Image: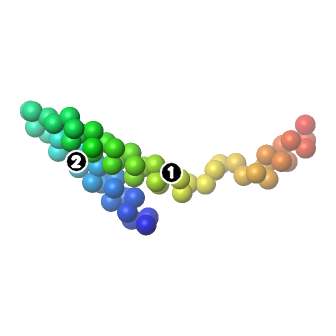
Amino acid sequence: MKYLNYILIMIGAVIAIYSKAGANQNQYILIAGIIILMFGVYRISKTIPSKYSETDDDNENKEK
């Protein structure tokens, strides 16, 4: 599943670049490429843990 996210990002980027390359750019293809790219980035960002854990928040509240 991890590689699927990277593949989505690559496919979205290639589609967005391809639609932008021509003189007569197709905006619908560009939008589709950006959507696929952002979907891949969103899926990767869900797997990144939070900088602060719940135990850090509890310790800060007790000190105050």
Q: Amino acid at mark 2?
A: Ile
Circle 1 packing at 10 Å, graded few (<14), some (14-19), many (20+), is few
Q: Which residue is mark 1?
A: 45
Lateral position of residue 44 relative to residue 32, left or right: right
Q: Which residue is mark 2?
A: 15
Residue that extends furthest to the right in the rendered view of this protein: 63
**Could you say which is closer to the camera, residue 57 or residue 28?**
28
Lateral position of residue 45 relative to residue 19, left or right: right
Helix, strand or loop for disc 1:
helix
Residue 31 lies, with reference to residue 13, above or below; the image says above
Helix, strand or loop for disc 2:
helix
Which residue does the image show at 70% across and 48% down from the upper left? 52
Circle 2 packing at 10 Å, graded few (<14), some (14-19), many (20+), is many
Which quarter of the image is occupied by the C terminus?
top right
Residue 16 at what x, y percent from top left? Answer: 24, 43
**Could you say which is closer to the camera, residue 34 or residue 60?**
34
Q: Amino acid at mark 1?
A: Ser
Residue 34 at what x, y percent from top left? Answer: 31, 42
Which residue does the image show at 33% across and 49% down from the upper left? 36
Point out the tag, 2 or 1, that comes first from the N-terminus.
2
**Could you say which is closer to the camera, residue 53 or residue 38?**
38
Residue 58 lies, with reference to residue 26, above or below; the image says below
Residue 24 at what x, y percent from top left? Answer: 9, 33
Mark 2–mark 1 Cα distance, whole angstroms, equals 21 Å
| Display coloring | rainbow
Residue that extends furthest to the left in the rendered view of this protein: 23
Which residue does the image show at 34% across and 44% down from the upper left? 35
Lateral position of residue 9 relative to residue 20, left or right: right
Which residue does the image show at 61% across and 54% down from the upper left? 49
Residue 14 at what x, y percent from top left? Answer: 23, 49
